[in-house]
Every structure is written in C-alpha cells, then in structure tokens.
Image: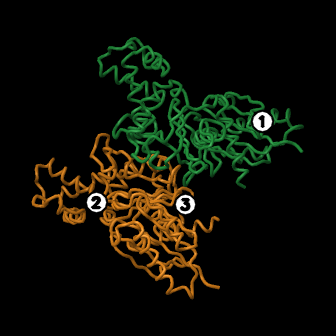
Chain colours: A orange, B green
Amino acid sequence: MKKRILFGMDIGGTNTVYGLVDENAKLIAHSGFKTNTKPEINAYVKIIAEQLSAMYNKYSTEYELAGIGVGAPNGNYYTGSIKLPPNIPWIKDLNLVQELKKYFDVPIVLTNDANAMAYGEMIFGAAQGAKDIIVITLGTGLGSGIIVNGKVVYGHEGIAGELGHVCVVPNGRHCACGKDGCLETYASASGIKRTLFQLIAEHDGKSVFNTITFEQLTSKMIAEAALQGDPIALEAFEYTGNLLGLALANAALVTQPEVVVLSGGLAKAGDLIFKPTIKAFEKYLLPLYRDKIKVIPSTLKNDSAAIMGAAALVWNEMDNN
Amino acid sequence: MKKRILFGMDIGGTNTVYGLVDENAKLIAHSGFKTNTKPEINAYVKIIAEQLSAMYNKYSTEYELAGIGVGAPNGNYYTGSIKLPPNIPWIKDLNLVQELKKYFDVPIVLTNDANAMAYGEMIFGAAQGAKDIIVITLGTGLGSGIIVNGKVVYGHEGIAGELGHVCVVPNGRHCACGKDGCLETYASASGIKRTLFQLIAEHDGKSVFNTITFEQLTSKMIAEAALQGDPIALEAFEYTGNLLGLALANAALVTQPEVVVLSGGLAKAGDLIFKPTIKAFEKYLLPLYRDKIKVIPSTLKNDSAAIMGAAALVWNEMDNN
C-alpha cells in the first residue's frame, strides 16, 4: 500500500510556495514561484495545478496524494475563497478550493495564512503538546491565529483571529484598514519604524538615525542599533513590547492559552522584543493567570513553516472525519 | 421508562438557587436558600444535598435524575472546584463536584457562573441557533462567557473568559483584582457610579445627583435620571457604552461571534446602554466584521437563567459522551 502524502501551500504577496509533507511530518520536496508570475486568476490557478502535478508525479509510485492544505491572506475556511487580499490586488474573490478541485480529487482545505501558521506551531513547532495557543506573526503587518482546545478558531464567518486590528490606542495611529490605533500600526516591522520616527520627533532628532529616511529604515536596523545601546532604538522596542503585551494579555483573558508564540521578522530581535512584551503581558493579566502562560519564539523555519502548517491543517481535518 | 430530568444550580454570593429541568427545557420546580445559611463547607454541601434530594423525591416516580449542572463564581470546569470566590469569603477551595458525588451517582458538571449563563443563552435564550457567542453580565461586576463553535471556551486551566479584566484604560481606575483600568471598573453597575462621580467632579457638581452620596447612588437612579434627560447621567451612559463597545470589538476580533448578549441589571437600561455600546462596537470592528454581529439583550428571566444554563451545560456534556 502506498503511503499517504499531502501538499501544503502558502500564498503570499511575493511568493507562492508549496511542498509535499508525509505522515511523519517530513517535508519531502518543496518549491515555489512568484505570485505575480501570472497576474490573472485562471492563469494563476493553472500554474499551481501544473506545478503541483509535476512535483507529485515524481513521488506517485511511492506515495498517494491524500489532500491539499492552503494558507492564504484573507483565506476563508468556510467558503474556500480568498477575498481581496491586501497584498495581491489582482485577486478579487478567488474560490481556490473549487478551482483546485477541478484538478485534484482529494480533500482541499484553505484558511487564513496566520491560522495555517498557528496550526503548524501546534503540530510541529514551538507549541507542540499545547491545545490552547495564540500565534502572532510580526511581519510587515501583524497576523494572528487562535487555537482553542486544539482547534483553530474560525468564527461565525471564517474570519476570526484579527489581533492586528484590536485597538490599543484609541484615536491612535491610522491603519490601512481604515481604523485608528490598531495593534499592527505599533507592533510590526512597519509599526516599530513609525515608533522610531515618533521618538526622534519627541527627542528633537538626537539619534543615530538622523541621516536615515523612513524609506531606508528597517526594523532590523532598529534592532542592530538597540544592540549597540542606542537609547532611542531601545525605547522603540520598549514601547512596541508594552502595547503588544497589553493586547496579548487582553486576548489571553478571552481564551486563556497555555502558550503564545511570536514569529516573523520582528520576533527575531529576541530579548529586545520578548522582554518588554512579557513584562507588559504579565502586568495586564489577571493575577490568577500570571506566571503560567509561556510567551516563546517560533521554532519553525520561516520558509517551511507555512507549508507545514497548511499541510497539518488538512491532516487534522481528515483525522476528524 | 422514566423521563430524564436534571438539576441546574447557581451559587451566588447572596443566594444558592436550584431547579429541576426536563428534556424539553421546562423548569419543573425551583427553590433556593441564602448561601450564608451554613457558612462552613461541610454544612453547606449537606444542605445542598438535602434540599436537592427532597425536591427530586417529589418527582422520582415520573423522572430519573440524569445529572447536575452547577454555575459558581470562580468555578473551574476541569477540576470541579470553586476557588476563592470574591463574594463568598468562607469558601477557600471547595471541590463541589467531588462532594456532591458522595450523595448523587450522576454526571456532575461545574463551571463559572458566567459560562453557565452563556450556555443558557445559547440553548434557551437570546442566542438560540448561534454557535459563536459572547455573553456579558453587567452586574456589580462584569462577567463573561465565550462560546466558540457551540462550545464554552474554558481555556488551558478552565478559567478563560474574563472580559471584566481586560484593560481598557491603561493606568485607569483601580480594580478589586489589583490591576488598573479593567473593563469592569467602567462597564458595570458599580463602574457607572464611579463614572457619574467622575463627571460630577469634572462638571463642578452641576447635577441632579448633588445631594446623593456614593453609597446611596444606584445604577438604576442613573438610568432614571438619563430618561429624564439629565445631561450628566446621559454622558455617564455614553462613556460606559464607549468603553464596553471598544472591549467587545477587541474580543470579537478574537472569536468573530454571531451574537453578543448583554444581561444583568445595567443591561436593563435598554437603549441608554445599547446605543452607545453598539456605536462604539461597530466603530472599533474591522470593516470586514461590521454590520453583522448582533448585540442584543438577554431574553432569559434573571431568576431562572442561571439554573437553566447550568442544566443545559450538563445536557450538552452527556450528548457529547
């Protein structure tokens, strides 16, 4: 009998990556292409189908394809659609599950990319063994996936888990979503850049960043300056961690997780971001909740985490049916 | 064959109430006693056992007792214990499930009183038919029960769902829990009293409440003054609703509920509290979430809601096993 194998796929604004994952959670093969290679829905679906078929064909004597899991921005678990993803403007409403079903007669599960990542952390990553988990991705924006009792929280219409848009500062910074004061305008790679510029303004420009434009500035540069002891860069991390810790504590009071996982570029700053985040997190928790919830970095490799997470999601789906 | 019947019980700081609920969700009989009648654990458990037995004996020819559901402050679903309930100081750590098992050989489920209420709203009340629900009780404090995909969210250790203690105003009002700025210091019967006094201070005492002490003041008096058009009382409701709406929106971004139910004394103020709450709620939601989530009053009668909710919880438990 052939062994079962799954495709995990992650659709990002820049890259579409996919891979074959076996039942032992081993990534057998992986590849990808630029999402904008064919910026038109039918052509894009066709290229996915062709590439997946080509990869699977190499392994089809040994393995049987058992399912496809997909993580995508604004992916809806219930409908199978990707709707107005902010970073892929040419996708308006793509029902990828329905389209891929034309090529592959296997269970296909699609969800928000952050949910897929969260699932990956639970099955393969830093949150292994836990059933109540919050996973935060601190990238350009802030993505989040919430797991309650071992299951991703999808919500009434499949779009739950938007911690990036909880309001942490009423009438605060303007967010691309149209609201003001959203967490992701503070706790993200772009948020900490805004904080640094705010601090430069407050400190009248006494900073090692005096000759850097907003466009040139990266969160990595802020982390490097902080490691050198630059007070404004250090203050930027304190400020970011304080608001992230506040929002995480408020979310933890809803679901009482066992583990909070921080992933993404900004989480790579290590103690610089973890220390102020954990300090604020503990401060804003109810006393009964304190000193119990781990706040830890992701242990998944960035390039495979999303693939593995999407694949894990479909394994779980099949085990429950 | 005898029909199945359940006990639902609600333990409050003032009253312990209980009743028999049949499979058609009909409250067959109910009664209660002062929680402090026997302020000692063994005596208290004994009085519960005696009263339940006496009530059940009247119906035991027709019905068979199938289970007991209990809602209690700081009740833990996983352990069956009531731990340091703020309003019943003589209970330190009472494993009521274990104690009642000595008297009744049936499934016994215990949880937080707010969770039991939330369950009651889903099965019998305002949230019937919905599977993703947030229920808020605006009493002396603020209790909350969260339901995701038809199941109460218990969290890692059984104490999830503490919206009363999310921070809505960093460094804000001091809360009995030890933190500052907790939602329940603003959105509760006692919270709106604090707000009214704050507004009197800001407006230099130009208020119909000038001759009322803090001890005399009730949230009902504030509602009555607001209905008469008193500007300070109206502002107190606006202020309360704005912070409640903000916190509810932030929680809704975690679980994307279909329905939010407001119950308890302050919710009886109707439009006075619902209008500003809904206005802020919609404002702080992500655009994709707007105009979809109902914020509605409880339809359960206060005296039976908690009994019915606790009973519903144990029905559900049995159906799942």
Q: Residue at x 78, y 47 (%)?
A: B106
Q: Nearer the viewer, residue B46 or A168?
A: A168
* Residue B102 at x, y percent in the picture: 77, 46
Q: Amino acid at mark 3?
A: Lys
Q: Chain of mark 1?
A: B
Residue beneath disc 2: A189
Q: Is residue A294 visible?
A: no
Q: Are marks 3 and 1 on the same chain?
A: no
State the quadrant of the C terminus of chain B: bottom right
The residue at the point 19 percent across, 50 percent down is A198
Instruction: State the separation of the CA atoms marked 3 and 1.
Output: 36 Å
Q: Are marks 3 and 1 in contact (CB under 8 Å)?
A: no
Q: Is residue A107 left or right of residue A179?
A: right
Which residue in the protein does label 3 denote? A131
Look at the image and tell me whether residue B290 can be seen.
yes
- Chain at numbered mark 2: A
Same chain for labels 3 and 2? Say yes or no: yes
Front residue of B215/A150: it is A150
Q: Any mark on residue B287, and which?
A: none
Relative depth, front residue between B140 and B257: B257
| Residue type of the residue flagged with mark 2 | Ala
Give the CA separation, mark 3 to mark 2: 28 Å
What residue is pinned by disc 1? B52
